Image (cartoon, rainbow, N blue to C red):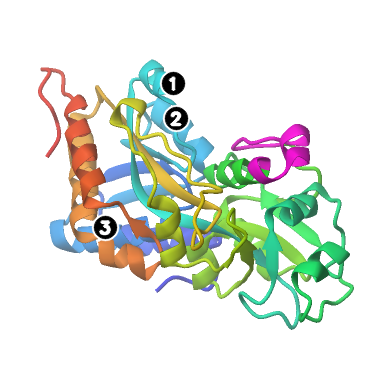
Amino acid sequence: MMSKFFTRAALATAALAIWANAASALDISGAGATFPYPIYAKWAESYKKETGNGLNYQSIGSGGGVKQIKARTVAFGASDQPMKAADLDAAGLTQWPQVIGGIVPVINLEGVAPGALVLDGPTLAKIFLGEILTWDDAAIKKLNPKLKLATATIVVVHRADGSGTTFNFTNYLSKVSADWKSKVGESSAVEWPVGIGAKGNEGVANNVANTKGAIGYVEYAYAKQNKLTFTKLVNKDGKIVSPATESFQAAASAAKWAPTEGFYEILTDEPGAKTWPITAATFILLPKQPQDEAATTEALKFFSWAFANGGKAAEELDYIPMPKTVVELIKKNWADVKGAGGKSLAP
């Protein structure tokens, strides 16, 4: 069982519980995005039971994962902000999407139940720009005419670390707000106009849970497991939607995964009546010519196992498994990962 909040201490405890006594030559080291940590932890626990091989995953944020895989200090990196093909080539890396999830606004507002509050993109942008300061602002009341909103100050909570979740969140805000695009823009780390910084999805979740009037953004598994109050959103088609497997799947349905482009795909603000507007894939980064061939081979075995056996666990945490057709493309692309003799390390 996960602890009540995905705090740094909780993550460390979970890692010890999952991988205690797992130090062996076949243990896999990885680092990066906090977005997929809940499902990677679930997969690691099952994989350990089946194979005896452990996974040591540092949930440090996408920026840290990219840095570590470029430095070759881990077997794989993980990022919710995909690298473009030219950057992958320059770093000698291959990339693929491992799982899909949704990013949701979460709030701490007394008397408001999960999913009761509706926001739209422009209003969300104004909140994070510091232009809407209280929960009873006219723009919020217009979207929620039947909801009694207190005159409470809004406290913005955002990521303090390099974050793929932030990249996707700010990418969405840049698409729905010209002011956000011109004043802040999209990146894994931006100059936030207002707010409190926190590390990782778990840090944002913890801060929102403990701060009256707060609003933040986290991967949906963190909202659900920590029983945070999430909002509904108005999507590109003007429909009010809830974060759920169905709405994440709707956003991903039109994705065009191109192996030659490193499977680069952004799933924010996609059309469709049922589409959740801040959906994202999380990606794995692996060296094409690894220094530790045994570790890389085991990492590929783990991800292959996850594709084949991890779908149910992913869905239980409200992630979307990659479609079988995409998995086939990904596995074909693994042929590019080669040992010193030029032989593919793909399982």
Where residue 137 appears, as percent x and y from the top left, is 87, 65
Give the Cα separation between the discs numbered 1 and 3. 37 Å
Along the polypeptide, which appears first: circle 1 or circle 3?
3
Q: Decide if residue 268 is on the left or right side of residue 134.
A: left
| Amino acid at circle 1 | Asp
Residue stretch in magenta: 174-190
| Amino acid at circle 2 | Met
Label 2 sits on a secondary structure element that is loop
Q: What residue is shown at x 42% (from left), y 18% (from top)?
A: 86
From the image, state whether disc 1 or disc 3 is nearer to you: 1
Q: How many marks?
A: 3
Along the polypeptide, which appears first: circle 3 or circle 2?
3
Give the Cα separation between the discs numbered 2 and 1. 6 Å
Where residue 8 appears, as percent x and y from the top left, is 54, 57
Where residue 238 appears, as percent x and y from the top left, is 62, 59
Where residue 248 appears, as percent x and y from the top left, is 44, 59
Residue identifier under label 3: 21
> Is residue 241 something that shows in the picture?
yes
Q: What residue is shown at x 67% (from left), y 40% (from top)?
A: 174
Q: Quadrant of the C terminus?
A: top left
Could you tell me if the residues under marks 2 and 1 are in contact, i.e. CB atoms within 8 Å?
yes
Q: What residue is shown at x 33% (from left), y 20% (from top)?
A: 92
Residue identifier under label 2: 83
Q: Toward which corner of the image does residue 335 lie, by quadrant?
A: top left
From the image, state whether disc 3 or disc 2 is nearer to you: 2
Whether 293 is among the magenta residues is no
Q: What residue is shown at x 76% (from left), y 56% (from top)?
A: 123
Q: Decide if residue 201 is on the left or right side of residue 43.
A: right
